[in-house]
Each structure stands twice: as structure tokens, then as C-alpha cells.
Image (cartoon, rainbow, N blue to C red):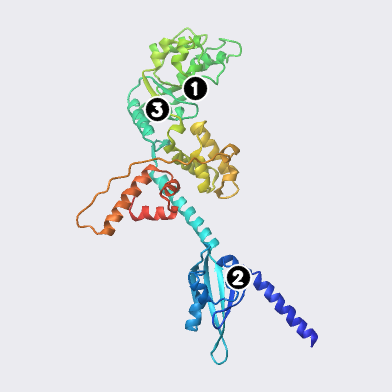
């Protein structure tokens, strides 16, 4: 008999320990609603203390303002099970299911309430909604992004300054006038040069040839550009070799880093541009060519002229039409579109489906990109290749990017003026004004997560309203 009592005691003790350590909250009252028992989880979720619970009924808890509402009180009054949400004053949200315990005569003995903490579940749901909204933003942005392309050659942009540059490229492509493209290293001078070639009629007749004047040794640059005759120098091939100007005949030759060209070779290049003839190293006969010349540099050619490192006559010969490409930090509107473009490109290349987390997007948008588009492209490829999960997180960014703080921009912008339309109800007037405000902010702040932060709303809410108003 003693063993049976001991076993029952131990079983009851085990059950109490299990319930007391349950993640879900348990709260029990007597038939009048007086607190009989509760576990630790109930204290955590409700935010109530033992001194507020012990000796009090749920009705007194309501009167004292310690509870916003009570499911147990509903059960006592209705004598049946009841379920409802309670937003506790500590910020937790609980799903409360209370059940009456009756005797054989139908009299109420106890009420047992189970409380499930929805705060964490709601946070996970919010994060999921944010991710879905961000992915929707990705999809829409990829559809909306302004990209101009000819036969696979594309320029990705959203900024007005790049729109003007692309417009200028269309005009420049119609003529064969020499063009010089200025811009920092990595801004995409070669991409623009190739784009001009493909817009022109020359892409149907000839090829596009790129030459980096700073990458070829000085003693080889002349023979690479103009070619050489057989036996013209030690090591020359017995059949000679055509130069890159000949390879580009009827097409376009792009001389990148023109400021690195030696002065002696600048004289020969000037002659080629004036006469449209080349002469191979070791050769005696001029070879006529029909080629368009586009040059580019990140150097200050005017300063180099004053320092006698670049010829005046060559400068004025190549500098007929000028295009300046600003660095990426000065056209930040393009960053998001470029990120998505290269993310999509490398996803296809490596047959994966990676996406950026919202925090990664914020970090990448706040970065100044000293290496410009080239650096952005390389970092996106690195993230796609090195990320083990489908969602690229902040801890996978290079160290210099992880340590950056996202700047808090406070820009005072003039909102669209209010317009009253006779005959509209208050609801219609408010909706119309909300539509105007959202349209304004969506066009001013990108990406959408940044816009949502400025407006003080959830990203999912912003996406939903954007869709409602057809923006």
C-alpha cells in the first residue's frame, strides 16, 4: 500500500514538473474564478507576478486593470469552452483556450486555461511576409528596370543621369566621329563603348575590338595595334601578323586607358586617325582602314597635356564627342537594379536560386562602391558562389561591408499638394491622398523596404497598398 501511495505521489510530482516546465501556459481557477494554480510559462506570457495572481479572482484582475480581458471569465459565465486572443499589457499575444471542469451534476468545479504564446509565431510570420514582399519587390523591379539592349548587350540603369548618357549614346552611334569616354575605373566605359558599336551600322559589317593600352608592354603595343611584317624583329612570325586596327576594319576599335599610351606611339595614332591608314612594323606600304575609334580614360588628360605626358594635337583629335560616366556612388538609384541584374545573371550561370535578405540589401545600398560596377558585379558573384543557403545573409558579406553602419537619411521632401474633388466622400478623399503620397514616396525611396521604413509601415503593408492602388 505504501509503495502504491509512493508511486502515485511520484507520478503526480512528475506530472506537475512537466506541466510547470511546459512552453505553453497553464492557468487553473476554481468555480468562482479564484486562482488555483499556474505554471512558469503563464507568468512569462501574461507578464503577471505571483503577488497579482495569488488570492485574486479573474474578475478582480479585470477590475484592477491587470488583464485586458479574460477567457476564464467567459467560461464561468457561459459554462462552456471558449477560445480567444488576448493582447497582454507586456506586449505578448496569447491564444487562450479555456475549458470548464464539471461534476456529475453539472456543477462547475474548475476552469483550465491553456495559453499559447503567439508573439514569436507572429514575428516569424512577419519575417516571412517581409521575405515574400521583398521577393515580390525583386520580381517587380526586374520587370520595371530600365534596360536598353541590342543583341544581348545591355545597360542597366534607373537614374536620370544614366538615361541621359544612354540617350547620348544613341545619337553618337549614328555618326563615325571619335568619342572619348571619361570615368573612374570600373564604371563601365567598355560596356558603353560596345553598346555604341552595336547601336551603329558597323556591327553588321565589322567587329568590336577592345585594347587596354595600359595592359600591353610598351615595346609590344605598336606591333599589337598595327601589326608587323615577317622577320621585322627578333621573334617575329615568319608570316607576319595583322594588327588590331586591321582586325577591327569596318568595325570599332576601343582604346581603353588611352592616357597610358607612350608619347612616341601617340604620334603614330594621330597619323592613323588623320589618314585612316596604318603601317605595319617593318613594313613600307600603308594599309587603308575604315575603323571607328572610341577611347576612354580615368586620367585627367588636360593635366597630362600641361605635364607634357599627352599630346595636345591627339587630345583635340579624339576629344570631338565627350561622354562622362559618373561613379556609382553618385547615381545610387542604379545600385539596386544592378544588384538584381547580376544576381539573376549569376543564378542562371551557376544554376541556383539565391536571394538577398533585407539586411544584406540595406548594407549593399549603403556601401559607396569605390570599385564601381566592376566591384559590385564581383561581390554579387562571390556571394552567389560562396553562400550555402538560398538566402544570402549579412554574415556572408565581406568584412568591410559587414562593419558598415547604415546611414540614417532624413530628407525633407515636399509632398504632393492636396486636391479636393467635389462630390467625393471622406473615404474617397483619404484614399486618393494616400495614393498620391505612396506614389511620391515609392518613386523617391528605393528599395521598397527603405520606403516602408521612411513611411513607418511594414513592407508587406506597403506592397499590399501598392498593389491596391495599381502603382
Q: Is residue 458 left or right of residue 103?
A: left
Task: Measure the C-alpha gap from mark 2 to mark 1.
Answer: 82 Å
Is 438 positioned to the left or the right of 399 in the image? Answer: left
Query: Which residue is painted at 71% across and 76% down in the image?
Result: 13
Along the viewing direction, whichever of 55 and 140 lies nearer the viewer: 55
Q: Which quadrant of the structure image shows residue 291? A: top left
Percent position of residue 348, x then y: 51, 44
Q: Secondary structure at mark 1?
A: strand
Q: Residue furthest bottom?
A: 105
Which residue is painted at 65% across and 71% down in the image? Answer: 20
Depth-wise, is mark 2 or mark 1 nearer the camera?
A: 2
Q: Quadrant of the N terminus?
A: bottom right
Q: Residue 11 in the image: x percent, y percent? A: 72, 79
Element type at mark 3 = helix
Instruction: Residue under label 3, please give it.
Output: 197
Circle 2: element type: helix
* Sequence-wise first label, 1 or 3: 3
Residue wearing tag 2:
51
Q: Nearer the viewer, mark 3 or mark 2?
A: 2
Where is mark 1, residue-wise? 211
| Front residue (pair 459, 214) | 459
Amino acid at each position: 500500500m505504501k509503495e502504491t501511495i509512493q508511486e502515485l505521489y511520484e507520478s503526480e510530482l512528475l506530472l506537475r514538473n512537466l506541466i510547470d516546465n511546459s512552453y505553453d501556459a497553464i492557468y487553473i481557477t476554481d468555480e468562482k474564478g479564484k486562482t488555483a494554480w499556474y505554471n512558469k510559462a503563464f507568468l512569462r506570457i501574461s507578464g503577471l507576478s505571483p503577488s497579482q495572481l495569488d488570492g485574486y479572482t479573474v474578475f478582480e484582475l479585470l477590475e484592477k486593470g491587470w488583464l485586458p480581458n479574460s477567457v476564464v471569465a467567459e467560461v464561468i459565465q457561459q459554462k462552456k469552452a471558449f477560445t480567444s486572443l488576448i493582447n497582454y499589457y507586456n506586449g505578448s499575444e496569447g491564444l487562450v483556450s479555456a475549458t470548464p471542469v464539471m461534476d456529475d451534476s453539472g456543477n462547475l468545479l474548475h476552469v483550465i486555461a491553456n495559453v499559447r504564446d503567439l508573439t514569436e509565431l507572429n514575428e516569424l510570420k512577419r519575417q516571412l511576409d517581409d521575405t515574400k514582399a521583398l521577393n515580390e519587390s525583386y520580381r517587380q523591379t526586374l520587370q520595371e528596370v530600365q534596360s536598353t539592349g541590342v543583341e544581348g548587350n545591355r545597360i542597366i540603369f534607373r537614374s536620370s543621369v544614366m538615361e541621359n548618357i544612354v540617350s547620348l549614346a544613341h545619337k553618337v552611334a549614328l555618326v563615325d566621329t571619335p568619342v572619348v569616354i571619361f570615368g573612374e575605373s570600373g564604371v563601365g566605359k567598355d560596356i558603353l563603348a560596345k553598346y555604341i558599336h552595336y547601336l551603329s551600322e558597323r556591327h553588321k559589317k565589322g567587329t568590336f575590338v577592345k585594347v587596354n593600352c595600359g595592359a600591353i608592354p610598351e615595346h609590344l603595343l605598336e606591333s599589337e595595334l598595327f601589326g608587323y611584317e615577317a622577320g621585322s624583329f627578333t621573334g617575329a612570325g615568319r608570316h607576319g601578323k595583322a594588327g588590331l586596327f586591321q582586325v577591327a576594319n569596318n568595325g570599332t576599335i576601343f582604346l581603353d586607358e588611352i592616357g597610358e599610351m607612350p608619347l612616341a606611339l601617340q604620334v603614330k595614332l594621330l597619323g592613323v586617325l588623320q589618314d585612316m591608314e596604318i603601317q605595319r612594323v617593318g613594313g613600307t606600304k600603308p594599309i587603308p582602314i575604315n575603323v571607328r575609334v572610341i577611347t576612354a580614360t580615368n586620367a585627367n588628360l588636360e593635366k597630362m597635356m600641361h605635364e607634357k605626358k599627352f599630346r595636345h594635337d591627339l587630345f583635340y583629335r579624339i576629344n570631338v564627342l565627350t561622354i562622362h560616366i559618373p561613379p556609382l556612388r553618385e547615381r545610387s538609384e542604379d545600385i539596386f537594379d544592378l544588384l538584381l541584374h547580376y544576381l539573376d545573371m549569376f543564378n542562371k550561370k551557376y544554376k541556383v536560386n539565391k536571394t538577398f535578405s533585407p539586411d544584406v540589401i540595406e548594407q549593399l545600398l549603403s556601401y559607396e562602391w569605390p570599385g564601381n560596377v566592376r566591384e559590385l558585379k564581383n561581390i554579387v558573384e562571390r556571394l552567389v558562389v560562396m553562400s550555402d543557403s538560398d538566402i544570402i545573409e549579412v554574415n556572408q558579406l565581406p568584412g568591410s561591408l559587414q562593419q558598415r553602419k547604415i546611414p540614417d537619411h532624413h530628407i525633407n521632401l515636399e509632398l504632393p499638394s492636396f486636391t479636393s474633388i467635389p462630390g467625393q466622400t471622406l473615404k474617397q478623399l483619404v484614399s486618393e491622398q494616400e495614393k498620391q503620397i505612396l506614389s511620391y514616396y515609392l518613386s523617391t525611396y528605393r528599395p521598397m523596404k527603405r520606403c516602408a521604413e521612411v513611411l513607418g509601415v511594414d513592407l508587406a503593408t506597403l506592397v499590399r497598398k501598392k498593389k491596391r492602388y495599381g502603382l
